């Protein structure tokens, strides 16, 4: 496999899965590991968004553990090995970068992307007319990410608003349709219109060059920080969230926002 770190890593995984290994690791299957690989992937994203190099290194290691376990299970079932995984991605990278490792020419990111898609299509042996462009987006992705990727694909083939005005108008249209559904108290229609509104919001993010998944994740983190500050303020007075009214909570929320803003100014 080339290097001692890889050999050590693989030997540890095999020991964990061995007869005298760890009971937890030994009982894992492809299916049982699914929530863990998703969790570790999200923690990598969080560490990267926080620009925390030490945490990112640790989380990448945790994600690599999942790859190691999957590969070990596959090897036990005589499907493939960790070396096969590494060789496979190495071969794919060389194959899909003929402008680097071959004689093809691609000078711009757009040309590289077009070449990449042509190679992928040829690898699958699918005729272009039989393949939907939407098939390029994995259904298992988080909803916001999946929506933005589908919109980007549609935009690349010309199915897009001519300017931002159309995007904003669509957003207002979806809000109006949601209000109409609410007036009718039609739950299935309300759900549908909320979905349309979220899709329009993602489209707005795309037009503004913002990753919708990252933006919402950061907003959730911000909400969590401020809510924790509210809880901390109340705890200082031997109170809990449930023991105070909405007016008090609104005041504490503003206080939490101010405190967060001051911390940001001091750290700048």
Image (cartoon, rainbow, N blue to C red):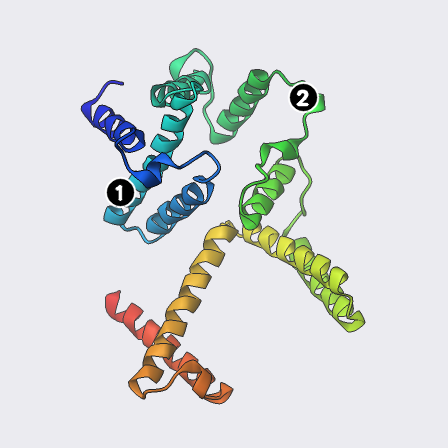
Disc 2 crowd rating (10 Å Cα; few below 14, some 14-19, many 20+) is few
Disc 1 crowd rating (10 Å Cα; few below 14, some 14-19, many 20+) is few
**For the residue labelled by badge 2, is the local secondary structure a helix, a strand or a loop?**
helix
| Residue located 34% across and 72% down the image | 260
Res 79 visible = yes
Q: Quadrant of the N terminus?
A: top left
Instruction: Please report contact status of discs 2 and 1: CB closer than 8 Å, yes or no.
Output: no
Depth check, front residue: 240 or 261:
240
| Residue located 44% across and 87% down the image | 243
| Residue located 57% across and 37% down the image | 138
Residue on which disc 2 sits:
128
Residue 218 in the image: above or below residue 103: below
Where does the image place residue 198, in percent across and percent down from the top left? 62, 57
Which numbered disc flags the more N-terminal residue, 2 or 1? 1
| Left or right: 221, with 171 as reference point | left
Residue on which disc 1 sits:
57
Where does the image place residue 166, in percent across and percent down from the top left? 68, 54
| Residue located 54% across and 43% down the image | 141
Image quadrant assignment for residue 129: top right
| Left or right: 135, with 242 as reference point | right
Outermost residue toward the right in this view:
184
Where does the image place residue 182, in percent across and percent down from the top left? 74, 70
Where does the image place residue 150, in percent across and percent down from the top left? 61, 41
Depth check, front residue: 263 or 236:
236
Residue 91 in the image: above or below residue 243: above
Image quadrant assignment for residue 14: top left
**For the residue labelled by badge 1, is the local secondary structure a helix, a strand or a loop?**
helix
Distance of label 2 from label 1 (alpha carbons): 40 Å
Outermost residue toward the front in this view:
19
């Amino acid at each position: 496999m080339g290097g001692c770190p890889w050999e050590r890593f693989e030997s540890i995984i095999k020991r964990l899965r061995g007869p005298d290994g760890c009971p937890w690791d030994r009982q894992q299957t492809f299916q049982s590991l699914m929530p863990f690989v998703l969790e570790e992937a999200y923690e990598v994203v969080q560490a990267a968004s926080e620009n925390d190099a030490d945490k990112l290194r640790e989380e990448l290691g945790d994600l690599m553990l999942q790859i190691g376990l999957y590969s070990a299970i596959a090897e036990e079932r005589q499907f493939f090995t960790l070396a096969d995984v590494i060789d496979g991605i190495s071969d794919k990278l060389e194959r899909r970068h003929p402008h680097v490792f071959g004689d093809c020419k691609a000078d711009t990111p757009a040309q590289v992307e077009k070449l990449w898609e042509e190679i992928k299509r040829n690898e699958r042996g699918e005729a272009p007319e039989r393949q939907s462009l939407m098939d390029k987006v994995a259904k298992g992705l988080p909803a916001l990410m999946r929506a933005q990727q589908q919109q980007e694909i549609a935009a690349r083939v010309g199915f897009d608003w001519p300017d931002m005005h159309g995007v904003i108008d669509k957003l207002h249209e979806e809000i109006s349709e949601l209000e109409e559904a609410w007036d009718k108290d039609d739950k299935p229609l309300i759900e549908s219109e909320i979905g349309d509104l979220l899709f329009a919001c993602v489209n707005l993010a795309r037009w503004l060059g913002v990753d919708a998944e990252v933006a919402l994740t950061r907003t959730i983190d911000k909400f969590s920080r401020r809510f924790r500050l509210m809880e901390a303020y109340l705890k200082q007075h031997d109170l809990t969230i449930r023991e105070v009214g909405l007016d008090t909570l609104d005041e504490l929320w503003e206080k939490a926002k101010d405190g967060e803003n001051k911390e940001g100014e001091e750290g700048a």
